[in-house]
Amino acid sequence: MDVVRGRVRAALIGEQPMFFQPLAHWLSSERGIETTFMGGHDSCPVDQVLALAPDVTVVDQQSGNGSLASMVAAIRAGLPKTTILLLAEHATPETREAAVASGCDGLIAKDGSAESLAVALLAARSNAASAAAHATSNIAAPGRSLRLTVREHEVLYLLAGGTSTAAIGQRLHIARNTARAHVQRVIEKLGTHSKLEAVAVARRTGIINS
């Protein structure tokens, strides 16, 4: 099973077509995530995003001509259900604060792999879907999906595909000990005692749909 495939529509906003256009093409053709690049020299691609109505919008930290927060706010106002992720050079305390300050739901670092971005897009979409399910159904586990970080959702998706802890580290370009720590936190947050049980609970409660 390919855990990064799924019915997800994504928008990439940035000012570097040579970087974003090939990335959008790869996500669409190789990972089945319908991805559209917007931006380039367009100072405000918000109208394009609103017309597309993507499930997940990835906004480069350098976009918006200094008005990143205004851009995110405009997208949020027009598409309250979309998940908005900030794309930064590195995942640091400063960039995490910038993501929160700009109104984004999470952070993705450029120093990660394209594969990790694909998994993050599905994880972000799954997180939003699980929140909606919790609001309308008694089946979803209260608060479980919302307690998982974007990275933990990535790890959970890979676990669901049968990926080992060592392979998770390789796929996400993180140390094996870091991968092991993420796996353990997923297990603990879902109130389970093993990887298999965590995946079973996640599927049963709708946190993941694979």
Image: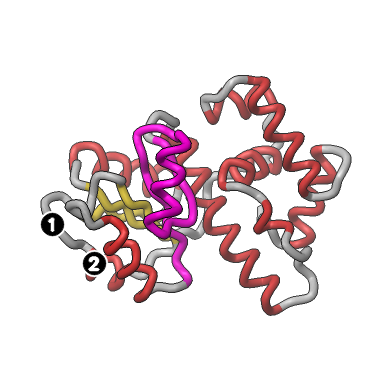
Where is residue 98 drawn, in percent x and y? 39, 47
Compared to residue 45, the image places residue 99 above or below, namely: above
Residue denoted by label 1: 42
Give me the disc on residue 184: none
> Is 21 or 102 nearer to us in this picture?
102
Q: Provide the secondary structure element on which disc 1 rests.
A: loop
Q: Nearer the viewer, mark 1 or mark 2?
A: 1
Seen at 25% across and 44% down, the residue is 62
Q: Is residue 90 magenta?
A: yes
Q: Which residues are magenta?
A: 81-109
Seen at 36% across and 39% down, the residue is 88
Seen at 44% across and 66% down, the residue is 82
Image quarter of residue 90: top left
Q: Provide the secondary structure element on which disc 2 rests.
A: helix
**Mark sitting earlier along the chain (1/2):** 1
Seen at 56% across and 47% down, the residue is 150
Could you tell me the amino acid type at mark 2? Gln
Give me the disc on residue 48: 2
- How does the figure colour the protein chain or chains? secondary structure
Q: Is residue 94 magenta?
A: yes
Could you tell me the amino acid type at mark 1? Asp
What is the spatial separation of the Cα atoms under label 1 and label 2, in whole angstroms? Answer: 10 Å
Q: Is residue 33 left or right of residue 13?
A: right
Residue sitting farthest toward the bottom: 136
Compared to residue 170, the image places residue 78 above or below, namely: below
